[in-house]
Image: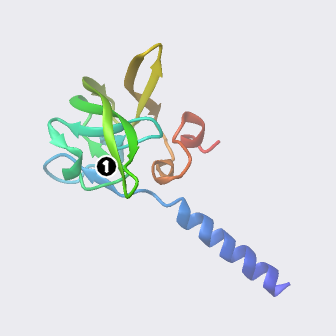
Amino acid sequence: MKIVIAFLLAAACCSCSQLKTPKLKTLFNGPQKPDSNVAVIATHSDSALLTKINGQPYSQLGSDEGVRVEPGDHNIQLVLPQDINLGYQSTIIASAQSDQRVHLRARHTYVPRARVADKRVMMWLEDLGEQVNLSCLNSAEPCTLDVAAGL
């Protein structure tokens, strides 16, 4: 019986560590703001990458999961990535790019999305709304409305 309980506790601890809250880079000056006063943008999804926010390249954002920004209007750059295998290494190149001006709302979480249909590429930030389980940003599963809500 003690072995079963120990196993269940170990399994619970492992699953909790996999669903930890992601590290988010803050992209505004001044004092730290409560989550109720900021918006969160995921830096990647299963279909698109966020490469710039207000002209600042992703490589300078310092986080693999997401960024915290003040609500309001922002200039973003989204990229449709394409994985190229060179035989000895694999690299990601941009097969399409979209520069957009978006309006972000406080307490909302956004995820970059892309879709290719009829030889056209569409890219956008999907608004997952409020009360999002941010652990989906660093999950192997795509961060969708159902996953973000914990369903």
Q: Give the vertical position of 140 relative to 42 (above or below).
A: below
Asked whether, in this view, residue 59 is left or right of residue 132, the answer is left
User: x, y percentage for residue 25?
Assistant: 27, 53
Asked whether, in this view, residue 78 is left or right of residue 3, the answer is left
Q: Which residue is mark 1?
A: 34
Q: Residue furthest right?
A: 1
Q: Residue furthest bottom?
A: 2
Asked whether, in this view, residue 58 is left or right of residue 128, the answer is left
User: x, y percentage for residue 21?
Assistant: 45, 57
Residue in the image at 45% along x and 35% along y? 47
Asked whether, in this view, residue 48 is left or right of residue 37, the answer is right
Q: Nearer the viewer, residue 122 or 143?
A: 122
User: x, y percentage for residue 79?
Assistant: 32, 33
Q: Give the vertical position of 118 relative to 24 (above or below).
A: above
Q: What colour scheme has been applied to the protein in the rendered image?
A: rainbow
Q: Nearer the viewer, residue 97 or 89?
A: 89
Say which amino acid is labelled 1: Pro
Mark 1 surroundings within 10 Å by alpha-carbon count, few (fewer than 14), some (14 through 19), many (20 or more):
few
Total number of numbered discs in the rendering? 1
Residue in the image at 66% along x and 69% along y? 12
Residue in the image at 30% along x and 47% along y? 67
Residue in the image at 18% along x and 43% along y? 57
Q: Assign the N terminus to one quadrant of the image.
A: bottom right
Q: Nearer the viewer, residue 118 or 98?
A: 118
Q: Quadrant of residue 71?
A: top left
Q: Give the vertical position of 63 relative to 84 (above or below).
A: below
User: x, y percentage for residue 81?
Assistant: 37, 37
Q: Assign the C terminus to one quadrant of the image.
A: top right
Q: Secondary structure at mark 1?
A: loop
Q: Is residue 2 visible?
A: yes
Q: Residue furthest front?
A: 87
